[in-house]
Structure formats: C-alpha cells, structure tokens
Amino acid sequence: MRKLAIGLAFVLATISGGVAQGQQVPEGGQDGGILVEGRKQGPRKEARRFVERIVTTTKDQLSRFNDPVCPVVLGLTPPYAKAIVKRFREVSAEVGAQVDRDEKCYPNVFVIVAADAGAIIAQLREKYHGFFRDLAYDDKRTALDEGPVRAWRVSEELDQSGRPGAQGPDGLRSFRGIDPGSRISLSTQQATYAAVVVIDVNAIDEKSVGQIADYVAMRVLAGARPPKEGGRLDTILTLFDGDAIVPEGLTQVDRSFLTGIYQMQANARLGSQAGTIADRIVRDARETGTAKKPR
C-alpha cells in the first residue's frame, strides 16, 4: 500500500498548478466540547444518531487507518503548514491512531489548500480517468460534491487479522478459507491507506490553524462528513457551514467519536461499530459532566 500512497503523491504533484501559493491562516485554539443536544431521547440514542449522521461507510463497515499516518500540507506558508501537521499528529495520537514520527515519512494524508478546489478535482478527472473509479460510494460522493471542501479516502479490504487476501492470476484478491464471520462480525475489515482533503483558499478566511487541523482530523481519521445543512450538531465538521456557530476546535463529542473509531472492532458489522462509538461518547460525557438532559 505504500507504493499506492506514493503514486497518489505523484498524481497530486502533477496538478499542483491549482494549489494556492503560500497562504496564511490565523492562529487560534482548539478547545470546546458539548454533547449533542437531544429531543426527548436518551443520551445513547442521541449519541447513536450523531454517529449515523456523520459516518461514511465502505462495504457496510467503518474504515480507519491501520498504518501510521503521515500528513503533508500544500498551499500554505511553511510555518502554518507545519502547525497544522503538528496539531494533526497530536490529535491522531490522542485518539489512538498510529503516527509516523519520521519527518521524512512517505505522506498518506494530503491536505491541499487550492486556489480553486473544484478545478483540482476537474484536473484529476481529466488527466486520470480512473482516479475516482474505485472509490467507495460515500468517498466518491464527498470527493465530487460541490462545495469549498472535497475530501476522500482510499481503502483496502483485509482479513480479520489485518492481512490482505491472496492475489489470484487475475490480480484480484480472495479471502477464501477464512472464518466466515458471525452475527456481529465479518470475515473482513476495511482499512484506509490514504486520504485527501482539498480546501478552497477563500474558505479558510478567519479559520484558525487549530480549527483547520481538527476538521481535517475528523474527515481523514474517521471519514466523517459534515452534517446536512440545518442539522444542529456540536462538531468541528460545521467549520465551513456558512450559518453555523463553529467551535474553536474538536468538541468533546468529536474526540469521543474519533477515539471510538480507533477502539472499535475493525471487522465488526456496522451496527456493532456504531454502537461502540456511541457508548464511548456517552461514557466520556458522563465522566466529564458535559452530558445534557434530553429535551
């Protein structure tokens, strides 16, 4: 998978003409956190609803990084790019994702601040016709949708132990002869091996380093998508929603969500995975005293 990530880096380098040059963003904090507001529902139901509203799936499972993450930021001046990378690494480690500490590591997380995010996507589709072909439906949708941010992840299917299937003469991988799974688990799991976030330069106006890094963490580490317009969720995922009241960084529920992603059983069925994350959200809320009464 390292070769594929390197190939992705090469592809992105060829369309760098659309990348913004040396943009700056304001500095700022990354605190905050209130559990989702409920409407006559118990905390766990409301937490489960939060999870269901922001997750993206691959073959009816949630995907996460198994390999250490190595981020790179393009289109910002070095001090700001380094600050975003530093914050992203910190968040990744805090929630349980592995982090490559080598400054010369091969990037597998690409954050691009572009003069025109839509133009970047158009160039990719024109120059590399198959670039988006093998993406999962949810990832293809978030990559091609209109908006100031385009984000997608590239995943692979592994067995329960995190190993790739046997490759046949046709180049396809097979998982024959492995445990068929059970009512709550499957014989395979989905693993992210690369992720891309393209942000329109005009959209970062008045956004802090901490906010951008935390937003990227939600999109990349968990494949979370912003809630639909009109949805009242206390999450950094609303950072680029025009009318939203945006937190200064990851909220408590965001942190719990990410931690749950990296604590869940990788080969569990979607319902079980979502339940694990919801339980983590509720448990953390009770421990920190931020849970609100349903209303």
Image (tube, helix red, strand yellow):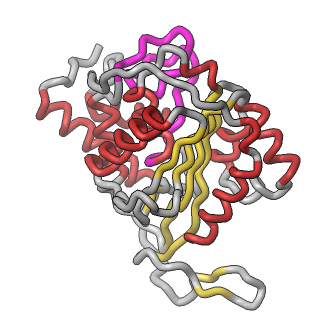
Residue 100: image x %, image y %?
A: 38, 61
Quarter placement of the N terminus: bottom right
Q: Seen in the image, is 147 located left or right of residue 158? A: right
The image position of residue 134, as x and y in percent, is 73, 59
Q: What is the span of residues highlighted in magenta in the rendered image?
A: 221-248
Residue ID at (22%, 19%): 292
Residue depicted at 26% across the width and 43% down the height: 279
Q: Is residue 40 visible?
A: yes
236 or 120: which is nearer to us?
120
Q: Residue at x 13, y 30 (%)?
A: 288
Q: Is residue 186 above or below residue 108?
A: below
Left or right of 58 in this view: 29: left
* Residue furthest top as drawn: 243
Compared with 108, 164 (above or below) is below
93 left or right of 236? left
Q: Residue at x 56, y 12 (%)?
A: 242
Q: Position of residue 139 (x, y in %)?
A: 64, 47
Question: Can the viewer see residue 41 in this picture?
Answer: no
Residue 179 picture location, percent across and down: 45, 82
Q: Which of these two is toward me, 226 or 204?
A: 204
Q: Which quadrant would the C terminus be assigned to in this image?
A: top left
Q: Is residue 247 magenta?
A: yes
